[in-house]
Amino acid sequence: MQSVFGLHDSKRIEVTCYATSSSDQSQWRRKIEADAEHFKDLSAMTTGDAARLIHNDGIHILVNLNGYTKGARTEIFALRPAPIQVSLMGFHGSMGAEYMQYIVADKIVLPVDVAAVGYTEKVLYMPQSFFVNDHKQSALSVLD
């Protein structure tokens, strides 16, 4: 996932990454910080200040990569800092929250009949796999 943030066409999409935990100085964190068009550390901010910053940045679509995992700060999403909020990858169950409008999935990880009865989000089904990975990191030779 670490290379994905730098792969967008900056003429069409502006990417801002918000970190909810302080830097561990890992190579992965440094790569994301370098590749994202904008990178902002929210770890020392209050929930309200973090939500206000995201809102003031004019974010159209806010993607939650953590869900209900450690350090996720889901309460920021509860304040609805962006008009569209999407759950992707980190936690693949339903958030069960009215402030998350969408979840990205595929029909293997989330069969249509399960989504119909157990998910509050609208499902954005990917045609193959919903799971974004980073071939640039694991198999750079195939990209040459």
Image (cartoon, rainbow, N blue to C red):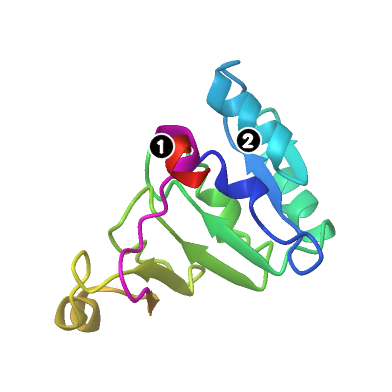
Q: Residue at point 70% right, 39% down?
A: 35
**Residue located beneath label 2 in the image:** 32
- Relative to residue 102, is residue 38 depicted above or below? above
The answer to whether residue 135 of the structure is visible from this angle is: yes
Tell me if residue 41 can be seen. no
Q: Nearer the viewer, residue 134 or 139?
A: 139
Q: Is residue 34 above or below residue 92?
A: above
- In the figure, is residue 20 to the left or right of 71? right
Identity, as a three-letter code, of the amino acid under mark 1: Ala
Residue 54 percent across, percent down from the top left = 74, 54
Residue 83 location (% of width, % of height): 66, 73
Give 131 or 82, whichever is nearer the viewer.
131
Mark 1 lies on a secondary structure that is loop
What stretch of residues is rendered in magenta? Answer: 126-139
Please check the rendered image and state whether residue 129 is part of the magenta-colored stretch, yes or no. yes
Choose mark 2 or mark 1, whichever is in front. 1
- In x, y percent, where is residue 6? 66, 47
Residue occupying the far front of the picture: 144
Is tag 2's residue or tag 1's residue first in the polypeptide sequence? 2
x, y percentage for residue 114?
A: 16, 76
Q: 96 left or right of 110? A: right
User: Who is closer to the viewer here, 3 or 114?
Assistant: 3
Q: Please, what is the three-letter code of the amino acid marked with disc 2?
A: Ile
Q: Which residue is mark 1?
A: 139
| Contact check, label 2 and label 1, Cβ < 8 Å | no
How far apart marks 2 and 1 lie (CA) works out to 18 Å
Other-residue count near label 2 (Cα within 10 Å), few / some / many at <14 / 14–19 / ≥20: some
Residue at image location 28% in from the left, 59% down from the top:
93
Tally of marks: 2
Q: Nearer the viewer, residue 25 or 20?
A: 25
Q: Quadrant of residue 39?
A: top right
